[in-house]
Amino acid sequence: MSHPIIVQGGMGVGVSDWRLARTVSQLGQLGVVSGALLAVVFVRRLQTGDPDGAMRHALEHFPVAGVAERVIEEYYVPGGKAPSTAYHLSALPALRPCAALMELMVAANFAEVFLAKEGHQGLVGINLLEKVQLTTLPSLFGAMLADVDYVLMGAGIPRAIPGVLDQFASGAPAELRIDVDSALPGEEFVSTLNPRSFCGDLLPALKRPQFLAIVASATLAITLARKSTGQVNGFIIEGDVAGGHNAPPRGPLQLTAGGEPIYGLRDVPDLDKFRALGLPFWLAGSYARPEKLAEAINEGAAGIQVGTAFAFCDESGIEPGLKRQVCQLAKTGQANVFTDPLASPTGFPFKVLQMSDTLSEADHYAARERFCDLGYLRKSYRKPDGTLGHRCAAEPVADYVRKGGAAEDTEGRKCLCNGLMTNTGFGQIRSNGVRELPLLTAGNDVAELARFLKPGTDSYTAADVVAYLFNHSAS
């Protein structure tokens, strides 16, 4: 099978949306939609009136009768909600989601992939986080209903995902073991989804997508290649300069004088071991230059993954004003990121773009009331009565401690769910009328965005990025 040379990163919450993925796919590369909090993004698009009709158009093609009507009845606001009105929340992720939440999650992922693939023959993938487990099965199933070509997953060890893809492709039920703190020896908590129960007699034939694991080391890649429940088809090898979540440094955590994790020689991926696996791999993390693409190919890679360069192009989902600000910072040499070892409730280091009037500013975040009303990064734990509970290190400290968490684990944590949602223009309106502030992430390569800008402009297109990488001008 021939693979694309450029994999567009599946970034943020609604950043790598269907428009960006479709554009990159039409340019002959792998367009990737982000599956993070996609159900929330979906219902907020509907509540803003779905002005271009794209969400309702996609729902018209959903293969299970009644789902589209129920979703639209619950969330669609003709003409859009008032700007000062809060968004209506969907149910929080759960081990046994109610029927309405299950339908919503499947439909949202279907719609995003359907729109990204509509009207062309290019390849489209979806990116998910292993750390966000409760939504994984409906996300994969919805994407497969829309004929997704690739599934990419990192932020953990996704050994079970290849087998899930095999099960769904055969129309069989799949289950996913959920990581649960304080679970008893031998005790398991599993998420399940039965395609035939969901679709009934309308279950279409499903294609098994290619699975690419996002890894930072050959050790993890070897484990996945040998011990996954099904076939791993390739790897995205992300370095520590890539945006979003980074793998923690190997060994004891040490910080620079500025408070960033120190990565060393042990964190440099051993490409000889990747080549020995005989599977295609792509290099990621500040590779968005023609010479770096050539270097990757010379090292035996199938190509490169590019995130930051696409994140701030015209077609991405980031709010246009924020994109202009970032491009202006890059032009003046002021675009900087901080690898925050504490920000993410997952415990993974997280790249935060340093900007005024965002949650990256300490005073802004200190003034924000702590709460967890989206819940996608909550950690599951076993209650004394054997039932499942959920806690987030970014929720109120007293709540976290009451649920058995340690107070010190809350220090420095930020609500990524709400901050990342705001980046794309869907920030929640609080009871005091204040809108959630954005929290932008980017790779170190954000400092070099100016290379894509034409003289006198503060914007560029996905086609400009692809043309630059292949070292010729966009038409």
Image: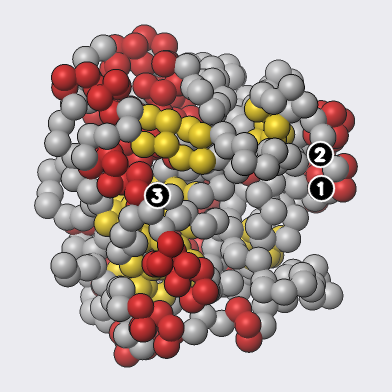
Secondary structure type for disc 3: helix
* Residue 173 shown left or right of residue 147 in the figure: right
Task: Kindly identify the amino acid type of the residue bearing the numbered disc 1.
Answer: Asp
Residue count near mark 1 (Cα–Cα under 10 Å), binned few <14, some 14–19, many ≥20: some
Asked if residue 196 is positioned above or below residue 326 in the image, the reply reads above
The C terminus - image quarter: bottom left
Q: Please tell me which of labels 2 and 3 falls first in the chain.
A: 3
Q: Nearer the viewer, residue 238 or 427?
A: 238
The N terminus - image quarter: bottom left
* The label number, if any, that marks residue 265 in the structure image: none
Secondary structure type for disc 1: helix
Secondary structure type for disc 2: loop
Task: Kindly identify the amino acid type of the residue bearing the numbered disc 3.
Answer: Ile
Residue named by callout 2: 405
Residue count near mark 3 (Cα–Cα under 10 Å), binned few <14, some 14–19, many ≥20: many
Q: Please tell me which of labels 1 and 3 falls first in the chain.
A: 3
* The label number, if any, that marks residue 161 in the structure image: 3
Task: Kindly identify the amino acid type of the residue bearing the numbered disc 2.
Answer: Gly
Residue 381: % across, % down: 69, 35
Which of discs 2 and 3 lies nearer the camera? The answer is: 3
- Residue found 60% across the figure and 65% down from its top: 247
Residue 31: % across, % down: 29, 55
Residue named by callout 1: 409
Asked where in the image residue 374 lies, by quadrant, the reply is top right
Distance in Å between CA atoms under marks 1 and 2: 7 Å
Distance in Å between CA atoms under marks 1 and 3: 29 Å
